[in-house]
């Protein structure tokens, strides 16, 4: 073999290698082939998962309140409880209202009361009798404690009667829970009340 043939052979090998390299480069740079997968038609739930942080709030928020304030005797609904129109949500204890009526007073839709020292107090409502005595009633919404604010000596006397009747009703309520029933009550000269209880076994 002459040198010229050797050169031709080497040149041919180089050309073939170059052509192969160019073909591979072009095939690698081209777009990938489209792959199609087929599946049977099926029915199911579409589940989506969203990860986020924040505060959830209702679309519509309704504030529920009452025209009068007082101790909550029963609560029939809580946060996130489903309710319907006309459903009883809460019941205010009527004992304080009944105590004022039994003490000879009536309630007024009055939010402020001025005491004998000239100070004005914010109250939930005012109980007043025929003599003009006034007692402001304030109920703590957190502790449910009842505070009475009176104006003058007449108001002080009315507040005392309301407290007495209210405490009396609370005692009777507690005794009823323990199984006792009121058989008879007698009002004494000093203003106290004597009660006779009975309990069925």
Image: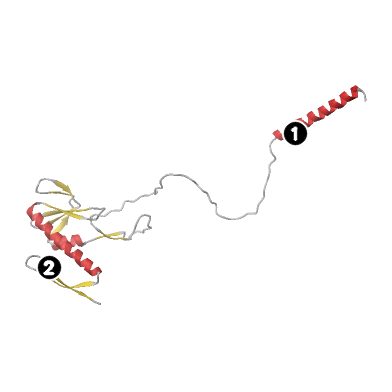
The answer to which quarter of the image holds residue 196 is bottom left
Camera-side residue: 64 or 122?
122
Assign the C terminus to one quadrant of the image.
bottom left
The answer to which quarter of the image holds residue 96 is bottom left
The tag earlier along the polypeptide, 2 or 1, is: 1
Helix, strand or loop at disc 2?
strand
Assign the N terminus to one quadrant of the image.
top right
Say if 117 sits above or below 184 in the image. Answer: above
Density class for disc 1 (Cα within 10 Å; few <14, some 14-19, many ≥20) is few
Judged from this view, the residue extending furthest toward the bottom is 201
Q: Specify whether residue 132 is in view.
A: no
Say if 86 sits above or below 4 in the image. Answer: below
Judged from this view, the residue extending furthest toward the top is 4
**What percent of the width, then of the height, locates residue 95?**
20, 62
Mark 1 — residue?
A: 24
Q: Viewed as shown, does residue 114 lie left or right of 88?
A: left
How far is disc 2 from disc 1 in space, using C-alphas? 111 Å
**What percent of the width, then of the height, locates residue 21?**
76, 31
Does the CB distance between marks 2 and 1 fall below 8 Å? Answer: no
Helix, strand or loop at disc 1?
helix
Q: Which mark is residue 193?
A: 2
Q: Which mark is residue 50?
A: none
The number of numbered discs placed on residues in the rendered structure image is 2
Which residue is at 22% across, 55% downward? Answer: 145
**What percent of the width, then of the height, locates residue 192?**
11, 66
């Amino acid at each position: 073999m002459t040198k010229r043939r050797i050169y031709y052979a080497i040149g041919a090998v180089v050309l073939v290698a170059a052509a192969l390299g160019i073909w591979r480069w072009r095939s690698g740079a081209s777009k990938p082939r489209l792959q199609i997968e087929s599946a049977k038609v099926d029915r199911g739930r579409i589940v989506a998962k969203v990860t986020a942080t924040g505060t959830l709030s209702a679309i519509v928020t309704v504030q529920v309140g009452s025209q009068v304030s007082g101790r909550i005797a029963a609560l029939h609904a809580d946060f996130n409880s489903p309710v319907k129109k006309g459903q009883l949500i809460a019941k205010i204890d009527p004992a304080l209202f009944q105590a004022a009526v039994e003490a000879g007073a009536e309630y007024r839709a009055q939010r402020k009361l001025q005491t004998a020292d000239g100070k004005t107090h914010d109250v939930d409502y005012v109980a007043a009798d025929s003599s003009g005595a006034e007692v402001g009633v304030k109920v703590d919404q957190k502790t449910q404690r009842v505070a009475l604010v009176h104006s003058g000596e007449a108001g002080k006397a009315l507040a005392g009667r309301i407290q007495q009747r209210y405490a009396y009703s609370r005692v009777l309520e507690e005794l009823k829970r323990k199984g006792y029933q009121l058989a008879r009550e007698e009002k004494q000269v000093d203003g106290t009340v004597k009660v006779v209880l009975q309990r069925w076994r």
